[in-house]
Image (cartoon, rainbow, N blue to C red):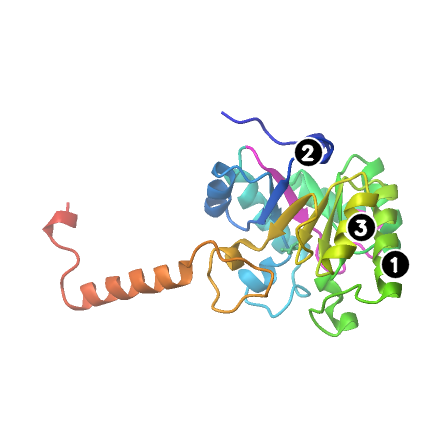
């Protein structure tokens, strides 16, 4: 039996040079498989909006949505650290951040993730002081797509790179235990990783981060098209399509069920 992974374990992994693996999870069954595979962190991301709820972006996701899926994921997880994503608009103020993070922790999350840097310094500090571990998220922050003009790589100019580095440092100083670096040049992610004591977890940020995260449904091949930074480790869309078409054909042709499948 493996040990339960805690927030201090994740912090120690950077010190010992062990790479951190994180994947998204939204339901109990898939969470149990990712957990059995030994993934260190399961993120109940607000990507839930796109992947599970059929929205175009994460903006419509509510705290009730994430709470519901955190409950499911935590029921399916034995070892991984479960992190709940704070949805858009649920941490504009310190009071909101504390109230809503509390809901995710009560639902079974062991930490929460928030997008932003300088703008949410007080929220991260307040959460940490109240004993709620906070994971930061800087660079391409999907909850700000309207401001960014879409899902665009951030930090390509010296000025924007400097701003993202500063955001990451502020997130660390405020007490975050780790930070997601999303959608930025590899050399910027490498510099942030070198300058921070807390682990960096990259997505579309190159190979030099302390860990990596992907949206599970991207990497398992549920979609025909995926972003450039996604490696598909399986082709489940094709596998499921083929299986379901075979089932349909066999039922229609009276070849399933045979007596073998009857009571
Ligand atoms: O919501 C999410 O899945 C995320 C990851 C992509 C980091 O924030």
Task: Indicate which label's residue lies in the foreground, 1 or 3.
Answer: 3
Q: Residues within 10 Å of mark 1 (few under 14, many from 20)?
A: some
The residue at the point 73 percent across, 62 percent down is 140
Q: Secondary structure at mark 3?
A: helix
The quarter of the image holding the C terminus is top left
The answer to which image quadrant residue 205 occupies is bottom right
Between residue 256 and residue 43, name the one nearer to us.
43
Magenta-drawn segment: 79-97
Residue drawn at x 51%, y 44% as measured from the top left: 31
Disc 2: which residue: 13
**Alpha carbon distance from label 1 to label 3:** 11 Å
117 to the left or right of 245: right
Q: Earlier in the sequence, mark 2 or mark 1?
A: 2
Q: Position of residue 76 (x, y in %)?
A: 50, 40
x and y percentages locating residue 25 in the rendered image: 55, 49
Q: Is residue 90 visible?
A: no
Residue on which disc 1 sits:
162
Cα distance in 3D space between marks 2 and 3: 18 Å
Please report the residue visible at 83 percent of the width from the left and 44 percent of the height from the top.
195
């Amino acid at each position: 039996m493996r040990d339960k992974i805690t927030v201090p374990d994740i912090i120690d992994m950077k010190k010992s040079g062990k790479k951190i693996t994180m994947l998204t999870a939204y339901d109990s069954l898939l969470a149990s498989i990712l957990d059995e595979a030994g993934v260190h962190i399961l993120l109940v991301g607000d990507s839930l909006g796109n992947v599970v709820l059929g929205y175009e972006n994460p903006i419509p996701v509510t705290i009730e949505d994430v709470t519901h899926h955190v409950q499911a994921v935590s029921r399916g997880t034995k070892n991984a650290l479960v992190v709940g994503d704070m949805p858009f608009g649920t941490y504009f103020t310190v009071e909101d951040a504390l109230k809503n993070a509390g809901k995710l922790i009560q639902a079974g999350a062991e930490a929460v993730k928030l997008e932003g840097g300088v703008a949410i310094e007080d929220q991260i500090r307040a959460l940490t002081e109240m004993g709620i571990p906070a994971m930061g998220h800087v660079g391409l922050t999907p909850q700000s797509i309207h401001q960014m003009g879409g899902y665009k790589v951030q930090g390509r100019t010296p000025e924007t790179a400097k701003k993202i580095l500063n955001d990451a440092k502020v997130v660390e100083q405020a007490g975050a235990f780790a930070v997601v670096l999303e959608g930025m040049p590899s050399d910027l992610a490498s510099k942030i990783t070198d300058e921070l004591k807390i682990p960096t977890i990259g997505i579309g940020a190159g190979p030099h981060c302390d860990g990596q995260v992907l949206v599970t449904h991207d990497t398992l091949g549920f979609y025909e098209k995926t972003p450039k930074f996604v490696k598909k480790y399986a082709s489940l869309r094709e596998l499921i399509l083929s299986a379901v078409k075979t089932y349909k054909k066999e039922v229609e042709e009276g070849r399933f069920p045979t007596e073998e499948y009857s009571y």
